[in-house]
Image (cartoon, coloured by chain):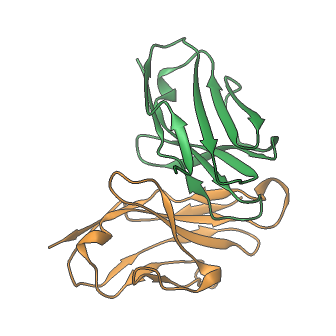
Chain colours: A orange, B green
Amino acid sequence: AQRVTQPEKLLSVFKGAPVELKCNYSYSGSPELFWYVQYSRQRLQLLLRHISRESIKGFTADLNKGETSFHLKKPFAQEEDSAMYYCALSGNAGGTSYGKLTFGQGTILTVHP
Amino acid sequence: DTAVSQTPKYLVTQMGNDKSIKCEQNLGHDTMYWYKQDSKKFLKIMFSYNNKELIINETVPNRFSPKSPDKAHLNLHINSLELGDSAVYFCASSQFLSTYEQYFGPGTRLTVT
């Protein structure tokens, strides 16, 4: 079974402060991990995926297989980063998990001025 | 130029009624999905279709029946609505079943009274 845990429902930081949104996963195979974001009054959209190893809008996330984590980080938060962030896992072992995205519970990030 | 659209945006109905939510994508994608987001913002997959074929069918009551008349449409029909069906329902699509970037619709907020 695949499972994603985001332990923080709410996270508040001040502008310019570092931010880290935690994500832990459980999956027996080799997973693909993603971060999706939903800004206010916008639809859910992909922010980044571990396989591309990109930095998007200053955010990075490193897959740590030893700790089964995929935390999202940004060194200097901006007010426009305020949004709901979902960590998601896709199993690629085939069978019923193929093509299935499992989402965490989501973290609402608020960046104060 | 909307990529994934859903109708209606809001749906208020009484227990026991039957209702449908429509989803259309103009991205030329092969795969479409339905997700349910509950009151705690937890996002869970319900169904996925690939080229009109049902691929993922999570543990969803059989009162929920997806229908895909063609690759660009995936409708969700719900019979005998219950209070617990109140949620936001999101449609999404991806280019292929094995491509995990999913494009989401704006959501349909269903309220059962």
B81, B68: nearer the viewer? B68
Residue B101: % across, % down = 63, 64
**Image height check: is B1 above or below A49?**
above
Residue A113 sits in which quadrant? bottom left
When the figure is inspected, residue B15 is found, relative to residue A48, above or below; the finding is above
Residue A90 spot, x, y in % from top left: 68, 65
Please state the horizontal and vertical placement of residue A51, each as a whole percent of the image: 65, 81
- Left or right, residue B83 beside residue A20: right
Quarter of the image where one finds residue A81: bottom left
Q: From the image, which quarter does the C terminus of chain B lie in? A: top left
Question: Residue, x 39% and y 54% (percent of image)?
Answer: A42
Residue B20 in percent (x, y) is at 59, 24
Q: Residue furthest front?
A: B1
Residue pictured at 53% horizontal, 38% vertical: B6
Number of disc labels: 0
Residue B59, image quadrant: top right
- Observer-nearest residue: B15 or A48? A48
The relative height of residue A4 versus residue B110 in the rendered view (above or below) is below
